[in-house]
Amino acid sequence: MKYENDLKSIFIKNKSNIASVIVFVKVGAVDENLSQAGLSHFLEHLMFKGSKNNPSNSMSKKIENMGGEINAATSKEFTMYYINIQKNYIIESIKILADALENPIFPKKEIDIERKVVIEEIQRYFDNPMSVLYEQFYKTVYSGCPLKNTVIGSSQVIKNVSRDEIYKYYKTHYTPEKMLIVISGAFDDLKISKIIHETFGKFKKGSLMTINNKLFNEDICVAKNLIKYKKTELGYMITGFLCPNIKEDDIYIATLVVNILGGNKFSRLYRSLYEEKHFVYEIESLFEVFNDYGNVNIVSIFDPSNMENVKMEIAKQIEYIISYGIMEKELNVSKLSTKIDFLLSLETSFGKGYTHGYWHFMRNPEFIKKYIKKIENIRIDDIVFFLKKYYSPKMILNIALLPKIKNKIR
């Protein structure tokens, strides 16, 4: 449903006693310049710290008193706010979220408190080897576009940003044309439509629609072996390559490919590198997808002396599939596992709301309807073709994080 101010909403009906109210806002790390690094994330922290009708932390207390939870999350391309609540309190939850997003107060006292919280969060984040590894991976694979930006942000920016700058950033991005409201649960459509119209539907449109000028580098991903050093005991590595974006049909095959490679204990890389050759302590593969790009990541943790063995074995396993394919049984097991994971994500009101909302918000609403059938129709030839199309030694990235030692591995 679309409202006069260009706000959009979708309703997901189910019989659960628990309902979810979710708001997606099209603002994230990709919208930030260097002087704004982390403002999307900082705003997420501040949005529940006082509003016109709910001063200080009263909105959180209201939700808790109704037996619910209120929370938020920031990503590279959007920020999400949500309330999980008993179905009888959906209308009150909509009012609370609308007030929070339309009328935030941003009290100086709360800003200063949250500065310390977020700066500590940033410090903890970069103390984590895997976080450091992922940030280096994004900076490398997406060096030519804003996807390289870190979501967590910069301590220096958070320390010095003024209330006026925070408010200006909020006014620029928190406009109804950049929002999607998702209601998931058991509810009366007419009542919910009416309350959304009376709350979110009254938000004023932005004076100018924010345009994110993404300057993409044509040579965004080229073969690279990069090693960084940190105080850590083990070696960490992401082996990755670019693949389809969110609007391409190849994303269905991508979800199956990563399951076959390293999605579980039956996967090729787990059996080869962990069970048979003992080159790794952990290994898994993931598919990340964005509006303009996607990437397959193979994440491994190992003894530093095994790094080259890990790289060679990963390449060997992928190239074997390209040359010889896979067994029909392996394909069927992977299909079953992939479908079960997807269906489990739709088990709760929040799961249904988030999944439907995400794919609508990312402009591919047909994904969910097509998913099971698309997975069932994938053949061995499709797996081979996908890897031939996207994987190449000329395009593979190996980003490693190793312990600081005197004689560094070259």
Image (cartoon, rainbow, N blue to C red):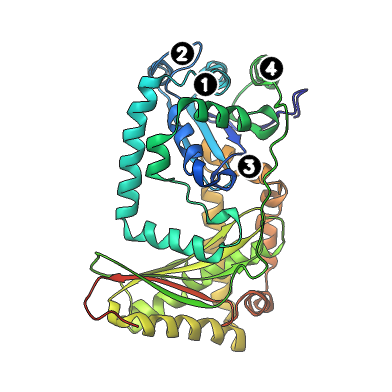
Residue at left 67%, top 45%? Answer: 212
Mark 2 touches mark 1? (CB < 8 Å): yes
* Label 3 packing within 10 angstroms: few (<14), some (14-19), many (20+): many
Q: CA distance from mark 3 to mark 4?
A: 24 Å
Amino acid identity at mark 4: Lys
Earlier along the polypeptide chain: callout 1 or callout 4?
A: 1
Q: CA distance from mark 2 to mark 1?
A: 8 Å
Check disc 2 and report the residue beneath it.
54
Q: Position of residue 132 (x, y in %)?
A: 38, 59
Amino acid identity at mark 2: Asn
Q: CA distance from mark 2 to mark 3?
A: 29 Å
Check disc 1 and report the residue beneath it.
100
Check disc 3 and report the residue beneath it.
356
Q: In the visual, does 280 lie left or right of 359? A: left
Of residue 157 and residue 274, the one placed in the foreground of this image is 157
Q: Position of residue 141 (x, y in %)?
A: 54, 66
Residue at left 43%, top 40%? Answer: 157
Amino acid identity at mark 3: His
Mark 2 touches mark 3? (CB < 8 Å): no
Check disc 4 and report the residue beneath it.
202
Earlier along the polypeptide chain: callout 2 or callout 1?
A: 2
